Image (cartoon, grey):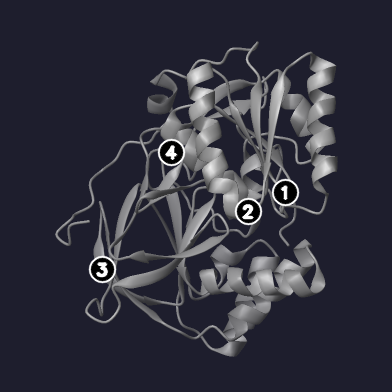
Amino acid sequence: MDDNFRPQWIGGDSAHRAAMSAPRLDPAAPLLFVINAGAGALDLEAKQAVIRRALAEHGRKGELLACEPADLGRVATEAAAAAAARGTAVVAVGGDGSLNTVAQAAHAACCPMGVIPYGTFNYFARTHGIATEPDAAARQLMDASPMPVQVGAINDRIFLVNASLGAYPELLQDREAWKARFGRSRWVAFVAACATLLRAQRRLRLHIETATSVRDVQTLTLFVGNNRLQLQQVGVDPEDTLDGSPGDGSMAALMLRPIGTMSMLGLMLHGAMGRLGDAAGVETFEFRHMVVRPRLATRRKVLVVAFDGEVTRMRAPIDMRVLDKPLYLLQASGAGGRASAPEAAA
């Protein structure tokens, strides 16, 4: 990316997405299920049984493509290309990280995508009215139609739920270590998050450009949400400053200013109560396109970033934006693209 790049106003509203032509979906063509054998608490045979049962009940055909996490990207790319050629859909079976990998492939191939969630939080599925119980989600798929949903991009990668720099990627790495030791649960994730935040003192010095502002900031983390449910749960869903709300035309950014230990404890309490937006030291704003550069660019050209639970390194500048091209998600009639009610944050 050119260092002289400047953000442009990129349209991403729901009316524009709805006007785009949905990819064809032949109900007689077999659905292609990409199954992350390493995601969730249930074993592979149990996941396959859920899918076969739903297919049999609805007289549908399907191909089950199971793979280990290391092969997920390759299998998803091949499945999405086949789905586009056959006029069918690729279905992601796993957690938010697995969904992201399959979504990358489906978005690039312009084929519809379905979801059977097996993650800890399943924000993407819940926001779009998809059942979090695998049996129910598999049954929903059988009569679902492709509907356009918003996706974000961080440099050359898309994300469905969130993207971040700073303390949040570190939090994700710590959470995986805690899960390996204490098991998968929301309480384990919450305790791991508290432990990370209490020792988070590494400051990011960033230059941030949006369509409406240019400024330099110091922050512990820069978190970007494309998922209204996740933002509502911790109380940082901002008032509309752009056309559309987060996940429907814009995204929301959260910045955490450097604060002391006692203030951090108060912040975590606000977050647990779903009132993070009321805590001191937290700033939120909406945007459609944002470019982020480290102010000490000669020393740090590569930044650690996270998106949809995956942690990697990207070369600056970091370009985050709402994409004009939607992802076509299989949704049951009446799902409405929104979860009925947020659950308590954990």
**Element class at badge 2:** helix
283 over 53 or under it: above or below: below
Q: Which quarter of the rendering shows the N terminus?
A: bottom left
Residue 215's label in the rendered image is 3
Count residues near mark 3 (Cα–Cα under 10 Å), then give few for <14, some for 14-19, many for 20+. Answer: few
Measure the alpha-carbon separation of dots 4 and 1. Answer: 37 Å
Which residue position holds label 2?
69
Residue kind at label 2, given as amino acid type: Pro
Give the residue drawn at x 67%, y 27%: 335
Gap between marks 2 and 1 measured at Cα: 7 Å
User: Circle 1 sits on which residue?
Assistant: 37
Q: Is residue 180 above or below residue 124?
A: below
Task: Identify the element where label 3 is drawn.
Answer: strand
Q: Is residue 241 left or right of residue 199?
A: left
Q: Are marks 2 and 1 in contact (CB under 8 Å)?
A: yes
First-in-chain label (4 vs 2) = 2
* Mark 4, other Cα within 10 Å: few <14 / some 14–19 / many ≥20: some
Going from N to C along the chain, the mark reached first, 3 or 1, is 1
Instruction: Give me the residue at 67% from left, 22% from top.
Output: 334
Determine if residue 255 is in view: no
Give SS at disc 1: loop
Image height check: is 344 above or below 203? above
- Residue 74 appearing in the image: yes
Identify residue for label 4: 244
Q: Position of residue 323 (x, y in %)?
A: 37, 40
> Considering only order in the chain, which callout, 1 or 4, is on the residue closer to the N terminus?
1
Q: CA distance from mark 3 to mark 1?
A: 44 Å
Please provide percent x and percent y for residue 296. 25, 80
Q: Amino acid at mark 4?
A: Gly
Q: Residue at x 70, y 17 (%)?
A: 143
Q: Report helix, strand or loop for mark 4.
A: loop
